[in-house]
Image (cartoon, helix red, strand yellow):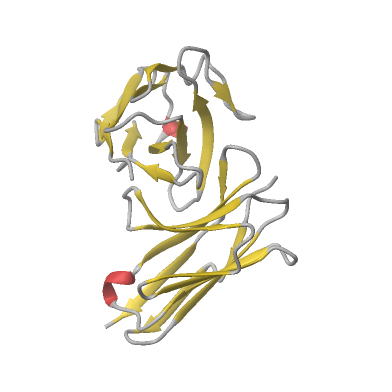
Amino acid sequence: SQQGEEDPQALSIQEGENATMNCSYKTSINNLQWYRQNSGRGLVHLILIRSNEREKHSGRLRVTLDTSKKSSSLLITASRAADTASYFCATDGTYKYIFGTGTRLKVLA
Amino acid sequence: SAVISQKPSRDICQRGTSLTIQCQVDSQVTMMFWYRQQPGQSLTLIATANQGSEATYESGFVIDKFPISRPNLTFSTLTVSNMSPEDSSIYLCSAQGWSSYNEQFFGPGTRLTVL
């Protein structure tokens, strides 16, 4: 299976701290996407990074991609209580995306 | 980005019945997909909804159980047939646009409970 694995599975931090989540995958990819899901709701697209990119920023989010290690990381800086959610990476080999196992982030006020 | 809506947002159904979920995109898209997310789990791809032809199902999912329609480039339906409690999940529709970046956007999901 191409499914990515994320670690940690769960992360609890204080407001203002940085949160780092990692995603590892198994096969070659064209793109990798990160999503956020608030409890029981749809997924919000955060960032897409292409296989020829190494780093991408969007506001407080920073995504890195290391294709040699088949891994990606998502860094959320200066976290807020509203960042509490599950975060998923999704990788594509052809035209469809396969989702990782997810990291449940809890930011304590 | 595409805006995707789903109906119904949630439903409670009896065992043995069927439910059809609708997915509407506000613009024409190339690809539409249906995912299932069981409680506390990640997303599992059910099938790719192909416009004008039969859907492409992933391993473990069959057309008789999850018939899918896609009559045009903005609309698709997923039917969950002959439901059992194991079908209780969130069902999510997603769409991929014309951009070369292949960004994929999701609807808000349909929360299904089967009694």
**How far from the left and from the top, in percent, is residue A102?**
51, 59
Relative to B61, say whether A5 is above or below.
below
Quarter of the image where one finds residue B5: top left
Relative to A92, say whether B110 is above or below.
above
* A102 sits to left or right of B27: right
Residue drawn 58% across and 52% down?
Answer: A31
Quarter of the image where one finds residue A67: bottom right
The quadrant of the image that shows the N terminus of chain B is top left
Q: Nearer the viewer, residue A33 or A14?
A: A33
Quarter of the image where one finds residue A32: bottom right
Residue drawn 33% across and 21% down?
Answer: B19
* A32 sits to left or right of A29: left
Residue drawn 32% across and 84% down?
Answer: A15
**How far from the left and from the top, in percent, is residue B24?**
29, 29
**How far from the left and from the top, in percent, is residue B26?**
26, 33
Q: Nearer the viewer, residue A13 or A59?
A: A59
**How far from the left and from the top, in percent, is residue B72?**
37, 17
